[in-house]
């Protein structure tokens, strides 16, 4: 029986690469995008397009209802990949910007996952895979709000994994470092005249979105999926430094001085 996977944030980058790859591996793909024109494009690419705005609770409810009807209440996997970033010093971030950041990266993901849990349980062997970030492990100046949303996603994923123990649903996190996608171009800069930019050295360690595919394959297809899958040397290194270094030394490294 063909297994169905829901992927959010499919218009480009990691989501689109994952959808194309998993389609070739024989999965049925429900590709969720925010814009209607992207939803139509998903159909042209061989996926089932789903309109989904994670920042809109009504949109999430409609998308979940559509998915449940299309999959006949039986779903193999949910790849929570959708999200965006708000960058800027904390003093420049309004409450409204923070609420929107969390609404998309955390609240919408929570709502969608809870609505789809019955269909995941029905499959008997299901997976939930969440796209976090190296900024779910460490925070840096100018990226505090985005990092906070990814820290929250990490904690949420840990709790969900433990709560679903014995249910047949496995929960994993993919933690990318610098990946070449449109994410940076789409960042909401709180200070347009002083945009937060990636350090030049980051380009040396940036990988294409295809770098996540081996980790995604393992998370979906291994009998014992890992709890966390760091991607890129930066993610591996920062995870190690966070465990080994005193906080004040790590602060100096992350401040860049």
Image (tube, rainbow, N blue to C red):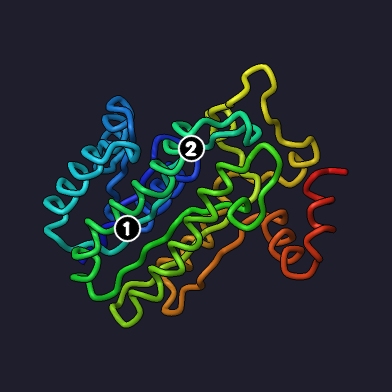
Which mark identifies residue 180?
Answer: none
- The residue singled out by tag 2 in the image is 98
Depth check, mark 2 against mark 1: the one in front is 2
- The structure residue drawn at horizontal position 56% and vertical position 37%, both measured from the top left corner, is 181
Quarter location, residue 123: bottom left
Residue 36 location (% of width, % of height) = 27, 27
Quarter of the image with the C terminus is top right
The total number of labels drawn is 2
From the viewer's perspective, is 251 left or right of 2? Answer: right
Residue 1 location (% of width, % of height) = 20, 67
Q: Residues within 10 Å of mark 2 (few under 14, many from 20)?
A: some
Q: Residues within 10 Å of mark 1 (few under 14, many from 20)?
A: few
Which mark identifies residue 26?
Answer: 1
- The structure residue drawn at horizontal position 55% and vertical position 49%, both measured from the top left corner, is 148
Work out which residue is located at the far bottom of the displayed protein and give it. Answer: 166
From the viewer's perspective, is 182 left or right of 44? Answer: right
Q: Secondary structure at mark 2?
A: helix
Q: Nearer the viewer, residue 210 or 199?
A: 199
């Amino acid at each position: 029986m063909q297994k169905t996977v829901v992927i959010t944030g499919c218009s480009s980058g990691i989501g689109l690469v994952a959808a194309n790859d998993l389609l070739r591996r024989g999965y049925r793909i429900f590709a969720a995008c925010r814009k209607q024109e992207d939803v139509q494009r998903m159909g042209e690419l061989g996926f089932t397009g789903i309109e989904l705005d994670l920042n809109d609770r009504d949109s999430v409810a409609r998308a979940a209802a559509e998915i449940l009807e299309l999959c006949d209440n039986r779903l193999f996997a949910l790849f929570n990949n959708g999200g965006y970033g708000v960058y800027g010093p904390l003093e420049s971030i309004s409450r409204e910007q923070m609420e929107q950041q969390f609404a998309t990266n955390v609240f919408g993901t929570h709502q969608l996952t809870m609505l789809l849990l019955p269909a995941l349980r029905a499959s008997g062997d299901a997976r939930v895979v969440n796209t976090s970030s190296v900024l779910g492990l460490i925070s840096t100046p100018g990226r505090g709000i985005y990092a906070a949303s990814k820290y929250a996603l990490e904690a949420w994923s840990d709790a969900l994994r433990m709560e679903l123990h014995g249910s047949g649903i496995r929960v994993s996190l993919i933690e990318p470092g610098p990946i070449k996608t449109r994410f940076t171009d789409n960042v909401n800069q709180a200070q347009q005249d002083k945009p937060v930019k990636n350090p030049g050295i980051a380009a040396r360690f940036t990988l294409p979105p295809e770098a996540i595919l081996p980790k995604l394959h393992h998370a979906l297809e291994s009998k014992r999926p890992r709890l966390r899958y760091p991607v890129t040397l930066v993610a591996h290194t920062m995870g190690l430094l966070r465990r080994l270094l005193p906080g004040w030394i790590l602060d100096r490294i992350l401040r860049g001085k």
